Image: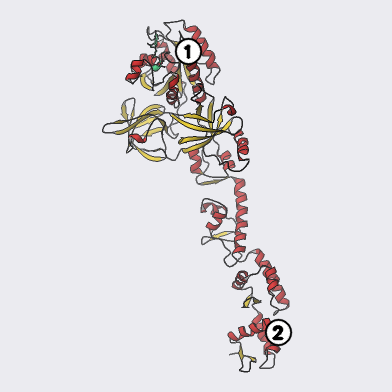
């Protein structure tokens, strides 16, 4: 099956043509038949001489119903432009053609209708001239009369040629079925219909509707139940557990995890200059028509804030229309479905420059360069093929993160001399990364991860080590000249750092603020043992070459250890070795 939409000015004979070709009535509503005018979309199908089935989406030509027309042609890859021989080119001939062009419809056929009423040649020449100016270019044309039947066989043959020239649909592509009708069938529940442009639908499969999961209960194509439907096709989907009121034209059923539901996009606008656009317009894609606030960014690019989120991909073609002005500005190409916020001063100007380099062609390398860090699942949802699963890092960004990580690990160690190894999560949050797995990936030798912490191998940070080296050098020269408070302060050695040094066995803390080398007690004992026993504090101070500030706590320290004894008269003696 393939699907073709009609297009053309009001009353030019679109519905009559569909009726003549299919024997089915495209004007479904009594009001349409009473007024002799199509209001909403009509659906019909027939078998062509080749045996192929073609389904028609018949659209209204009246200018008031252009939104319905757009909903019909939006998801359809081919169109029949109908121009009446007796009327020639008219405003909605032009508007519909511009819409087809903007939406990227490349395959079309010109039908000059009502050929029994006038010579079709002038209308044909006029229409071909307009078509030639669009990306549709040259097309086949057929003159027909629904009254006499002239040209209908030729038209059937031309339709077969149009159908066989269409690109083969990608059946592995994700599904995005834009709903054009939603109704209830007694006993079955909610049914939606649409044109399946790509991919494959199966009964009992799961889809997303408004970013939540729904299940397909049953499928129909061309009025008959089927278990799977391949694109391109008209399809009716019976949904399980979805209220009729929860779904309407303009919604889309999509393959789970394959589309970004977004209300903020950056786009390129083709045709009219962006500066001339109104600040509010209607964004049309598929069967959806959503109010959009337009913020120009650059000469042909803009940021659109949509009134509701739509499932979109980078590269989607859409259309912006100002309902007040009955003309179609050029189409829109979606450049970014997850654009960065523009908060900083100058961010909008920078973004405009960036957008000028983007073309809507999905590229993971470009996305990585711009985003620096992105999850493969998010790329997939943007319609950008991911080169690998999981988190993806721009190579240049990865290098700079690795350097920042090493610096953060060092900084953490300085702030936490006692426990210098930072928890992985502390570094994750300092680097502003969304996942521990990324930190683990950035940790490189000499750093390692041990027990959920990043270890730099050396227990003490560099700055602390240098300060301690200075103190130890002083003490090597004068073992009992404990550094004064101002010296310690100058070296950045507070109680925390001294505690860490003590823990690491680099210094011995004999009292608050009094540090010596760990070898000091043994050296002291050696010298004190050479004194006449017992000895006074004063002689101990002289033997050690120090002051009371150190001698008093040192003797207390030795006493606590049982290395010296204190006599009732206040003198000291070295305890006999036991
Ligand atoms: N003489 C003649 N009249 C035709 C032919 N095709 C359509 N008509 C008449 O033209 C009028 C409009 O035809 P429709 O098929 O309703 O036109 P339409 O393009 O579907 O109109 P909208 O859906 O309202 O845009 C009707 O009165 C038709 O009977 C034809 O080939 N010859
Ligand atoms: Mg009609």
Image quarter of the N terminus: top left
Say whether residue 38 is left or right of residue 575: left
Quadrant holding the C terminus: bottom right
Q: Position of residue 571 (x, y in %)?
A: 65, 92
Other residues around mark 1 within 10 Å, as few (<14) / some (14–19) / many (≥20): many
Q: Secondary structure at mark 2?
A: helix
Which picture quadrant has residue 162? top left
Kindly identify which numbered label has been placed on residue 362: none
- Which colour scheme appears in the figure? secondary structure
* Element assignment for label 1: strand
* Viewer-nearest residue: 410 or 49: 410
Disc 1: which residue: 141
Tell me where residue 179 sits by quadrant. Answer: top left
The relative height of residue 532 versus residue 510 in the rendered view (above or below) is: below
- Who's the residue at 73% across and 83% down the image? 545
Dot placed on the residue nearer the N-terminal end, 2 or 1? 1
- Ligand 1's quadrant is top left
What residue does disc 2 label?
544
- Where's residue 339, x and y in %? 54, 39
């Amino acid at each position: 099956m393939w699907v073709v939409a009609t297009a053309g000015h009001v009353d030019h004979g679109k519905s009559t043509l569909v009726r003549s070709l299919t024997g089915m009535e495209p004007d479904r509503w009594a009001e349409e038949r009473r007024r002799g005018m199509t209001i909403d979309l009509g659906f019909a199908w027939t078998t062509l001489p080749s045996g192929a089935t073609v389904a028609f989406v018949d659209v209204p030509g009246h200018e008031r119903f252009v939104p319905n027309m757009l909903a019909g042609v939006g998801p359809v890859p081919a169109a029949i432009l109908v121009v009446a021989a007796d009327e020639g080119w008219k405003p909605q001939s032009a508007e519909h053609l511009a819409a087809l062009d903007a939406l990227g419809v490349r395959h079309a056929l010109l039908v000059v209708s009502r050929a029994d009423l006038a010579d079709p040649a002038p209308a044909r020449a006029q229409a071909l001239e307009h078509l030639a100016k669009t990306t549709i270019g040259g097309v086949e044309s057929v003159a027909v009369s629904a009254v006499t039947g002239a040209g209908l066989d030729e038209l059937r043959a031309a339709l077969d040629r149009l159908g066989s020239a269409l690109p083969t649909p990608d059946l592995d592509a994700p599904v995005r079925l834009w709903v054009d009708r939603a109704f209830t069938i007694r006993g079955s529940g909610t049914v939606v219909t649409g044109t399946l442009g790509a991919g494959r639908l199966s009964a009992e499969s799961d889809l997303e509707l408004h970013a939540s999961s729904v299940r397909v209960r049953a499928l129909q194509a061309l009025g008959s139940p089927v278990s799977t439907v391949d694109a391109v096709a008209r399809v009716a989907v019976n949904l399980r557990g979805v209220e009729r009121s929860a779904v309407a034209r303009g919604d889309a059923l999509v393959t789970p995890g394959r589309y970004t539901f977004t209300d903020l996009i950056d786009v390129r606008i083709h045709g009219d200059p962006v500066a001339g656009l109104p600040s509010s317009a209607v964004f049309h894609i598929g069967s959806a028509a959503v109010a959009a606030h337009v913020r120009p960014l650059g000469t042909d690019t803009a940021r659109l804030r949509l009134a509701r989120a739509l499932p979109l991909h980078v590269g989607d073609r859409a259309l912006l229309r100002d309902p007040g002005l009955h003309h179609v500005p050029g189409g829109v190409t979606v450049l970014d479905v997850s654009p960065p916020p523009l908060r900083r001063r100058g961010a909008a100007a920078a973004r405009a420059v960036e957008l000028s380099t983007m073309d809507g062609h999905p590229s993971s390398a470009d996305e990585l360069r711009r985003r620096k860090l992105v999850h493969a699942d998010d790329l997939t949802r943007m319609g950008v093929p991911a080169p690998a699963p999981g988190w993806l890092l721009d190579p240049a960004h990865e290098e700079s993160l690795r350097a920042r990580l090493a610096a953060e690990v060092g900084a953490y160690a300085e702030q936490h001399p006692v426990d210098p190894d930072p928890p992985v999560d502390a570094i994750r949050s300092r680097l502003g990364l969304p996942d521990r797995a990324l930190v683990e990936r950035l940790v490189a030798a000499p750093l390692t991860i041990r027990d959920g912490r990043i270890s730099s191998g050396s227990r003490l940070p560099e700055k602390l080590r240098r300060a301690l080296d200075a103190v130890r050098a002083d003490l090597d020269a004068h073992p009992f000249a404990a550094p004064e408070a101002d010296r310690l302060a100058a070296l950045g050695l507070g109680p925390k750092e001294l505690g860490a040094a003590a823990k690491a066995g680099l210094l011995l803390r004999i009292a608050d603020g009094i540090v010596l080398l760990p070898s000091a007690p043994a050296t002291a004992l050696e010298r004190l043992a050479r004194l006449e026993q017992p000895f006074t504090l004063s002689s101990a101070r002289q033997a050690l070459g120090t002051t009371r500030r150190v001698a008093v706590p040192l003797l207390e320290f030795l006493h606590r250890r049982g290395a010296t004894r204190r006599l009732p008269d206040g003198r000291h003696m070295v305890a006999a070795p036991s």
